[in-house]
Image (tube, helix red, strand yellow):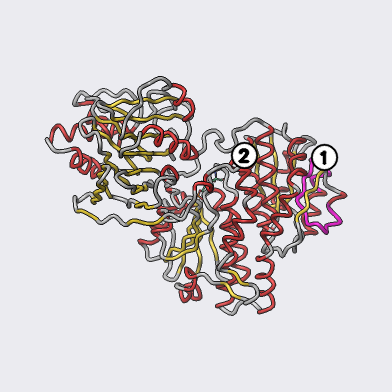
């Protein structure tokens, strides 16, 4: 949550910072601000999007070689001009931006208020900033030392960028729990919540770790820990092009990302799956193969869409590997006292690799001796780095707030992992293994075929766009897909939607059914097909509007449903990667038809780095 950008070097800072903020807007978009050092310290900030700030500063002298910028997802204090970052210290000499939450800010605020500090905003950030300034003045130390002392008192999560009008070429940065990347250029440095603000300038980056502090000048990058010991920055080469973070002619990132899926799934399988040779090559699994073979249990922790991928994996792993699987919301897992046995493996699934609850959940599990296997999209992210092993989903940057291509990447990785373990454990017949490899390899092509029929889903979306509620029902492997369809519709169209196991609907939700309620059945051909046909009959008997996602050869459901959308035939283990696609399209087209900004729906942020 919240995007942060910084630049110091010979170039004009403002255009770099503002372009960077536009790329990071997916992280939060309720207010924006910049601080520029140009002889003095100037702060411009505004409620609203980056474009609103740009309009507000037209005509201002924005010349500066050092600057920081912030796009906010509000935690403390409503979105407003005054709560927007950067914040100025009481003296007006320091400006700071912050991503995260200072949990003990109320205590610090009380201490500072007793000393006479008056706060303009309701934010925890302004408290931390004045706390730093107070330490600098009282301890008569330099700013770097004041930051160190302050951060040792702070509980919570943060990335901060701090500038001082008396050090016009310096940015002080520190992180704990929220992401920070520093781009290393020639005589210049870039800072960002991810690498997107610096892509056209440098491919050399340093991922800052928790409890590290950086003093960043054009020609110098000093990295230290909070104990003031110097560290050697580890420079990594980025494998990402600018085109990957642009819309490429699509109206929205979400649509682009949906349509990229034949390619992203192919990229995920590439170099790993070889159906001809009958092999799956995954070093993250191979390196831990004895652990996997002997695992007493797999516990999957994740949030949101990634949690839904975990639910699909539960079905697949238990079926193929006969290892018990539990799927946990990371936010619950981290605060209860779960039993973790020797030999348990924790799967952490995350697109961003920065979700605070998932990150802390695996830290806790690691402390108890669990092995962590990360299934992550963002290379070099915190979850990827803390994991003992893992597999990247290789879906490329996902910018639309609604997760789409990362989800199918997660399903592809999890299916490969399950197949690999099943094979190593001797739990799967050669014939079934080979059949599933061939089917998995065919997924990109089948997804492409589904996407060709996008206009059919668009027509359904147009017809039902006025709905106020919707039910999504599925059984077996398609039950988590029903949950995912409901989540997508909620976040992108603001239509209230619920996902249920189709049979469970008789235990309550069926009371909602009337002639106005769209009920989306994820009903591809599988072992439960006849059962779900009965569930469709039950909805029709109560006049519900049935929209069914079905397999091409289905000859029962078309006669019952109001609308059908066909997907190619596939094994039930593979089917979720296909049946989720029309649901992504349905939510996208409904959102657009209802006038929602689908890439940045209200109240949401792409990466949830606060708990
Ligand atoms: O980055 P993560 O996969 O850890 O994010 C988890 C959820 O925040 C995320 O899936 C969220 O639910 C999406 N907005 C769903 O589309």
What span is colored magenta in the figure? 538-557
Can you give x and y, in whole percent of width and height, for residue 244 in the image? Answer: 53, 48
Graded by Cα atoms within 10 Å as few (under 14), some (14 to 19) or many (20 or more), the crowding at tag 2 reads some
Question: Vertically, is 461 above or below 334?
Answer: above
Can you give x and y, in whole percent of width and height, for residue 422 in the image? Answer: 58, 74
Alpha-carbon span between mark 1 and mark 2 = 23 Å
At a point 28% along the width and 36% down the height, the residue shown is: 162
Graded by Cα atoms within 10 Å as few (under 14), some (14 to 19) or many (20 or more), the crowding at tag 1 reads some
Q: Nearer the viewer, mark 1 or mark 2?
A: 2
Question: Vertically, is 312 above or below 60?
Answer: below
Can you give x and y, in whole percent of width and height, for residue 101 in the image? Answer: 36, 39
- First of labels 1, 2 by sequence position: 2
**From the viewer's perspective, is 380 left or right of 430?**
left
Question: Disc number at residue 543?
Answer: 1
Give the quarter of the figure containing the N terminus: top left
Determine if the magenta segment contains residue 579. Answer: no
How many marks the image carries: the answer is 2
Q: Nearer the viewer, residue 560 or 269?
A: 269
Determine if the magenta segment contains residue 547. Answer: yes
Residues under numbered marks 1 and 2 in contact, where contact means CB atoms less than 8 Å apart: no
At a point 70% along the width and 63% down the height, the residue shown is: 572
Q: Which residue is mark 2?
A: 490
Can you give x and y, in whole percent of width and height, for residue 109 in the image? Answer: 27, 30
**From the viewer's perspective, is 541 left or right of 300?**
right
At a point 45% along the width and 73% down the height, the residue shown is: 287
Question: Disc number at residue 555?
Answer: none
């Amino acid at each position: 949550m919240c995007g942060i950008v910084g630049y110091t070097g010979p170039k004009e800072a403002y255009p770099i910072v503002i372009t960077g903020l536009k790329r990071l807007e997916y992280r939060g978009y309720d207010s924006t601000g910049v601080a520029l050092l140009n002889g003095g310290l100037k702060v411009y900030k505004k409620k609203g999007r980056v474009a609103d700030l740009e309009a507000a500063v037209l005509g201002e002298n924005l010349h500066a070689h050092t600057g920081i910028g912030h796009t906010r997802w509000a935690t403390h204090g409503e979105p407003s001009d005054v709560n927007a970052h950067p914040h100025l210290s009481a003296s007006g000499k320091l400006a700071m931006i912050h991503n995260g939450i200072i949990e003990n800010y109320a205590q610090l605020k009380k201490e500072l208020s007793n000393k006479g500090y008056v706060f303009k905003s309701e934010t925890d950030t302004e408290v931390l900033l004045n706390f730093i300034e107070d330490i600098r003045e009282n301890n008569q130390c330099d700013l770097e030392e004041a930051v160190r002392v302050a951060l040792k008192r702070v509980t919570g999560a943060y990335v901060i960028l701090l500038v001082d009008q008396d050090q016009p070429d310096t940015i002080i940065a520190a992180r704990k729990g929220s992401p920070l990347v520093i781009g290393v250029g020639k005589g210049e440095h870039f800072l960002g919540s991810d690498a997107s603000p610096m892509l056209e300038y440098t491919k050399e980056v340093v991922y800052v770790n928790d409890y590290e502090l950086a003093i960043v000048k054009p020609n110098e990058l000093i990295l230290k820990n909070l104990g003031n010991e110097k560290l050697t920055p580890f420079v990594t080469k980025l494998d990402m092009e600018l085109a990957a973070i642009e819309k490429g002619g699509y109206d929205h990132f979400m649509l682009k990302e949906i349509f990229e899926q034949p390619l992203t799934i192919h990229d995920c399988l590439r170099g790993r799956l070889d159906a001809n040779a009958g092999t799956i090559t995954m070093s993250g699994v191979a390196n831990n193969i004895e652990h996997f073979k002997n695992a007493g249990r797999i516990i999957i922790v994740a949030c949101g869409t990634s949690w839904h991928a975990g639910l699909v994996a539960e079905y697949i792993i238990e079926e193929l590997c006969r290892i018990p699987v539990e799927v946990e919301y990371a936010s619950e897992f981290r605060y209860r006292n779960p039993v973790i046995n020797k030999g348990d493996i924790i799967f952490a699934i995350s697109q961003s690799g920065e979700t605070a609850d998932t990150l802390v959940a695996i830290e806790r599990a690691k402390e108890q001796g669990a092995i962590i296997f990360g299934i992550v999209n963002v290379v070099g992210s915190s979850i990827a780095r803390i994991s003992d092993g893992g597999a990247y989903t290789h879906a490329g940057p996902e910018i639309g707030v609604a997760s789409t291509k990362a989800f199918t990447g997660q399903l592809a990785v999890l299916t490969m992992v399950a197949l690999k373990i099943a094979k190593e454990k001797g739990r799967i017949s050669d014939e079934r293994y080979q059949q599933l490899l061939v089917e998995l390899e065919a997924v990109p092509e089948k997804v492409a075929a589904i996407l060709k029929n996008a206009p059919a889903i668009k027509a359904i979306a147009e017809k039902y766009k006025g709905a106020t509620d919707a039910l999504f029902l599925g059984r077996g492997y398609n039950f988590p897909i029903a949950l995912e369809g409901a989540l997508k519709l909620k976040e992108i169209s603001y239509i209230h939607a619920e996902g249920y196991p189709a049979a469970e609907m008789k235990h309550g939700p069926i009371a909602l059914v009337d002639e106005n309620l769209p009920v989306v059945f994820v009903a591809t051909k599988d072992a439960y097909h006849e059962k779900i046909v009965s569930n469709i009959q039950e909805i029709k008997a109560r006049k519900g509007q049935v929209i069914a996602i079905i397999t091409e050869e289905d000859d029962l459901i078309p006669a019952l449903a109001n609308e059908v959308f066909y997907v190619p035939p596939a094994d039930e283990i593979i089917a979720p990667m296909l049946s989720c696609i029309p649901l992504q399209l349905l939510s996208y087209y409904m959102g657009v038809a209802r006038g929602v900004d689908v890439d940045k729906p209200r109240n949401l942020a792409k990466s949830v780095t606060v708990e």
